Amino acid sequence: MKTMEGEKKISSAIVRRLPRYYRLLQRMREQGRERISSGEMAQMLNLNASQVRQDFNNFGGFGQQGYGYPVETLYKEVRRILGLDREHRVVIAGAGNIGRALSGYPGFAQQQFRILALFDVNPSLVGTKLPNGIPILHIDDMADYIRDNAVDVGVLAARRSVAQSIADTMVEAGVEAIWNFVPMDIRVSVPIENVHLAESLFVLSYRMQEQEKKIQK
Amino acid sequence: MKTMEGEKKISSAIVRRLPRYYRLLQRMREQGRERISSGEMAQMLNLNASQVRQDFNNFGGFGQQGYGYPVETLYKEVRRILGLDREHRVVIAGAGNIGRALSGYPGFAQQQFRILALFDVNPSLVGTKLPNGIPILHIDDMADYIRDNAVDVGVLAARRSVAQSIADTMVEAGVEAIWNFVPMDIRVSVPIENVHLAESLFVLSYRMQEQEKKIQK
DNA sequence: TAGATTGTTAATCGATTAACAATC
DNA sequence: TAGATTGTTAATCGATTAACAATC
């Protein structure tokens, strides 16, 4: 082990591979695997073995020459690096299709993302609860709720016209990160991660066309 | 105009920027803007003006020296490049939270992605219709439905254990692309685009931690 | 024409891959 | 010890940025 975490700036390319390593290690762990080599990880994730070793060495030397990486240790390290070793408290702005679908998504609870409440303006929704018991509250109460309940993650699933202003309210009330499902560029001072479904679909459409062109030749 | 489309291989980085240009041009168009320069696009999308020009020149010379790019023309070109100038016929496997949320997503219909049906095994869902009229059919009927209705895009929103086999059925029945919401690597012979929500959330979690560390210093 | 902005080549930067000594 | 595989430096590759002649 040579490098210490936190010293160098980790590139976005590397950060986006971390969840993939995490998922792989989780699976290996469930299967009772005790060690795994960079070559094996590379093959399973369609990467290069050097790249895998480079990636992990940004955070410290977790492997052992001649042996590989201990699955359990590496799993825990990656979980810690990703910040998944503590509970996150989440609210969702917008109780429409997306907002409700996200609240039912099992992946969150499993990784300690607790969804506390949804917020909306629709009078026929406000005051009700989802089947799983999560309450839908009025958006005007969101700021206080965030403060009172130590919410650290805000999810944007509202209409486009109000999205920026809701984001501002969230940040002002104290969320530390925003997960944005609204197809627009939100400007905030905290980390934000965009899930632009339409863009992903358009990329698919492009590749589909490209494929057709290839076949026609 | 020098290069002809289809000659060179377009890198993934460029393809992923195309939807962002598209969205920007759509907005400019709605605002009645007639022309736009590479510099202006770069600024709005947080890119470099050279990069913008390089990107478009992969597909042909759409600009004019001393003037910029005509918005309407460029918009239509990008739409065509992305394959959004024709209707796509879509089915969704899995009528759970995600599947139903996607069927209600207005972005699709606007871009000519027509969702024809959902498929599931749940007897209390099969045979019913969503509020917007889209029918939920039995998964066993999916292959025939795809063939009979010229479906070209399959959406995977089913449980993990059946996802690969459903994907195989879709491809066998003739879909040309798969949009995958199941957090696993699906192996198919057609283009596939993964929307791994958990991975996106984990990246957010990472950045949040990183930010905290910075502040503590 | 003069000014602006493209299209395109060249330079730079950063990420990926290869190579190999260190070492378990 | 011999074999395997890491950690790390060096080489390569590809993407981004800069520069500028072409031209509207």
Image (cartoon, coloured by chain):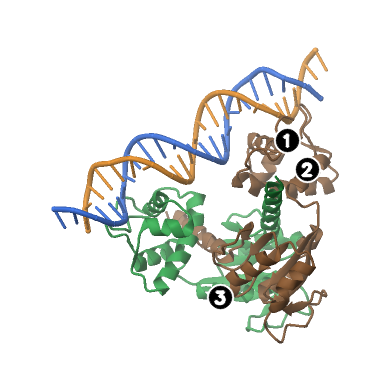
Chain colours: A green, B brown, C orange, D blue
Q: Position of residue B181 (x, y in %)?
A: 62, 66
Q: Which residue is mark 2?
A: B77
The kind of residue on which mark 2 rests is Glu
Callout 2 environment at 10 Å: few (<14), some (14 to 19), or many (20+)?
some
Q: Is residue A5 above or below residue A126?
A: above
N-terminal-most mark, 1 or 3: 1
Q: Label 2: state its secondary structure.
A: helix
Give the labeled residue for mark 1.
Answer: B60
Q: Residue at x 45, y 48 (%)?
A: A9
Quadrant into which the N terminus of chain A falls? bottom left
Where disc 1 sits, the SS reads loop
Residue B212 position within the rendered picture, expressed as x and y whole percent measured from the top left: 47, 59
CA separation in Å, label 1 and label 2: 10 Å
- In the rendered structure, the answer to whether residue B209 lies left or right of residue B179 reads left
Q: In the rendered image, which residue does mark 3 sit on?
A: B161
At label 3, the amino acid type is Ser
Tag of residue B76? none
Q: Give the chain of mark 1.
A: B
Q: Chain of mark 3?
A: B
Marks 3 and 2 close (CB-CB < 8 Å)? no
- B124 vs B47, left or right, is right
SS at circle 3: helix
Q: Residue furthest front?
A: A217
- To the question of a shared chain for discs 3 and 2, the answer is yes
Report the amino acid beneath label 1: Gly
Tag 3: Cα neighbours inside 10 Å, few (<14), some, or many (≥20)?
few
Q: Is residue A51 left or right of residue C22?
A: right
